[in-house]
Image: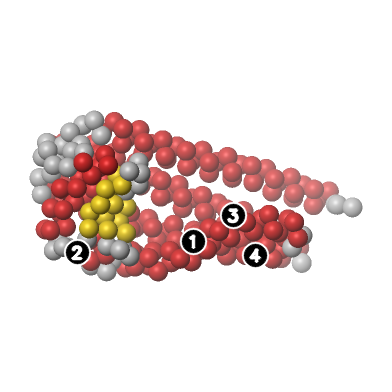
Amino acid sequence: MLSQKSVVSSDKMTAFSIFLFLGTLALSLWATWRVKAAYAKYSEVPASSGMTGAEVAARIMAASGIYDVEIVESNEMLGDHYDPMHKRLVLSTGNFRGASTAAVGVAAHETGHAIQHQMAYAPLNMRMAAAGLAGYANMAVAFLPVVGFMTGLLRPMLLIMCIAWGVIMLFNLVTLPVEFDASNRAKKVLIDMGFIRGPAEIAAVNRVLNAAALTYVAAFLTSLGYLLFYLLPLLSGNRRD
């Protein structure tokens, strides 16, 4: 028969799990909404240079002495990214062909990652090295809870989940300086090379890139929250032991 203390502890964990799920979901949705809203607004604001995102990316990389990175177009909406393994800078159609403040801002941000790669920026190297492990950790957190509850091996499941979420949390943590640095480089180079001019265009690029940064902060806070969720029962169990 469960003691009253155990029932209270179980109720607290249930309440915490509901709060964690709803809280992190709301945070992620809010961050995603901010990105889409900012991008939709400033994709309608043309950059005075009249250059497309692809042209801006090519000019920035040439100025940085980077000639071995291919710029390719993708049909995926906001699927822009830099692929260090294949040295490809992937821009969605709107940013590849568009000449808006949003397009040049995103293109310059992704080019910032290519510059990081060229200069062997330590946080980027750490993220690249941890990407495979983080992928396995994401698979683990998706399936292990089901296995743990079906087999009744809750404590081993909690321990492995802590390790997996710890890996994801550290990966998201090291991602923050990588993304912030790329955005700071983008903001500076766009002004220095004359791709954006005047306070209105500068503010537009800042808002798009700052909104995008929120998604990485949300991912880190989510992983930290779930790490604590699986860690606390282990710690409380050790204290009872």
Picture mark count: 4
Comparing marks 4 and 1, which lies closer to the viewer? 1
Q: Nearer the viewer, residue 100 or 192?
A: 100
Q: CA distance from mark 2 to mark 3?
A: 37 Å
Q: Earlier in the sequence, mark 4 or mark 1?
A: 1
Give residue 23's position: percent from left, percent from top.
55, 41
Does residue 148 appear to the left or right of 162 in the view shown? right
Q: Secondary structure at mark 4?
A: helix
Q: Classify 105 as above or below 133.
A: above
- The type of residue carrying mark 3 is Ala
Q: CA distance from mark 3 to mark 1?
A: 11 Å
Q: CA distance from mark 3 to mark 4?
A: 15 Å
Farthest-out residue, right: 1
Give residue 2's position: percent from left, percent from top.
86, 52
Q: Which residue is mark 1?
A: 135
Q: Which residue is mark 3?
A: 142
Give residue 22's position: percent from left, percent from top.
58, 40
Q: Classify 92 as above or below 180.
A: above
Task: Identify which residue is drawn at 47% across, 42% down.
Answer: 28
